[in-house]
Image (cartoon, helix red, strand yellow):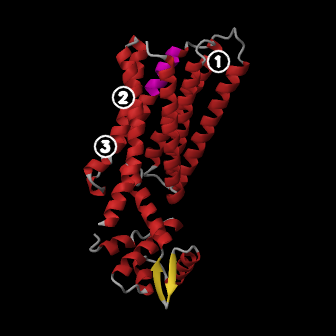
Amino acid sequence: MIDIAILVASEIVSAGLAFALVYFFFKAYRLTRFVHLLGPPIGFSFLASSYFFLGMSLLYENDVAVSESFFWLRLVTQSFGFAFFAFSYYFSSKTERTTKFFLGLIAFASAISILLVFVALIVAPPFLEVPCINVLDEYFRIANLIFLGYVICHLVKHFEPSHGTISGLIWAPLAFSLLWLAQYSSLIWGIDGSQTAFVLAHVARLASLTLFIYVYHSSGRVGSESRKA
Amino acid sequence: MFTTPLEELAVKVGKRSRIQIYFDILRILREELKNDKPSLTKVAHIANLPYDRFRKCLDKLIQLDMVSEQNGKFFVTERGFECINEYERINDFLVRMGLLP
């Protein structure tokens, strides 16, 4: 069994990487002001929160009530994070007005959902039977796979090598594929308890987040190289 | 199709965010400076802007210390170059992420 400290550290590192991505994507939004670009920073904020909540859930694993509360929050925030990515790509070719309306709607829905989870966790009477969290975890993961699958399909469909070198454009679909693999591995681990799948899920997720950061930094490097030329 | 990089900078007619218009002006001015003949009328024409509107944008850029005027000639300042570089980097990043329409 993997040491709990390593797992908590993995969650903290993931949260840190995701927060760095929030900063990069928000910077991009601030500069271009395309409304659909609000999706990735919001999505990564949710993801960073979900990693933090999972870390807390692991840290307090001896206290079942606290641990499960954090796990619930993690489930909801993670799925909303992936949903925001999917909606951003969906709205990238739509009008600004439609995008603004729907992003506002999704943000409102996610805020209400998280609030409801919070309220339910605090005020729900103990005798009330809550569905098994592990079963729900699998449903949420299937939803995550659908959201990420949509993003990957969108990127592959709109792949235009004329926009730049193929090597430069391949990293984003690869990073999302790794996120997909992480979710898939977690699903497999949830079903059969495979340790390989569990390790793969963590490695793929960290690799994916690192790759997103690499995409940002390599964009800058290529830009400055071309300017020097 | 664009025949020169400068024409490519002239970019889209239609809706552009205000920030993008300022960056277009900066980039076109930078390209024109390479030819050593930055004519404002030509820059306004390439940027697809009426001269009065272009002039307002240029004044704003001067105010922001991104463009400087010396002896009737206009230059992109260090700050202006930094902004262009940053904009190009972010633009490249968004293209790589598949997030630009």
For the residues labelled 2 and 3, the Cα–Cα distance comes to: 17 Å
CB under 8 Å between discs 1 and 2:
no
CB under 8 Å between discs 3 and 1:
no
Where residue A97 appears, as percent x and y from the top left, is 55, 54
Identify the residue shown where x is 57% and y is 13%: A131
Pointer 1 residue = A66
Disc 1 marks a residue whose amino acid type is Val
Q: Are marks 1 and 2 on the same chain?
A: yes
Q: Secondary structure at mark 3?
A: helix
Asked if residue B96 is positioned above or below residue B29 in the image, the reply reads above
Disc 3 marks a residue whose amino acid type is Val
Residue A135 forms part of the magenta stretch: yes
Q: Earlier in the sequence, mark 1 or mark 2?
A: 1
**Residue in front for this viewpoint, A56 or A39:** A56
**Quadrant containing the N terminus of chain A in the rendered view:** top left
State the mark number for residue A156: 3
Where residue B36 appears, as percent x and y from the top left, is 36, 85
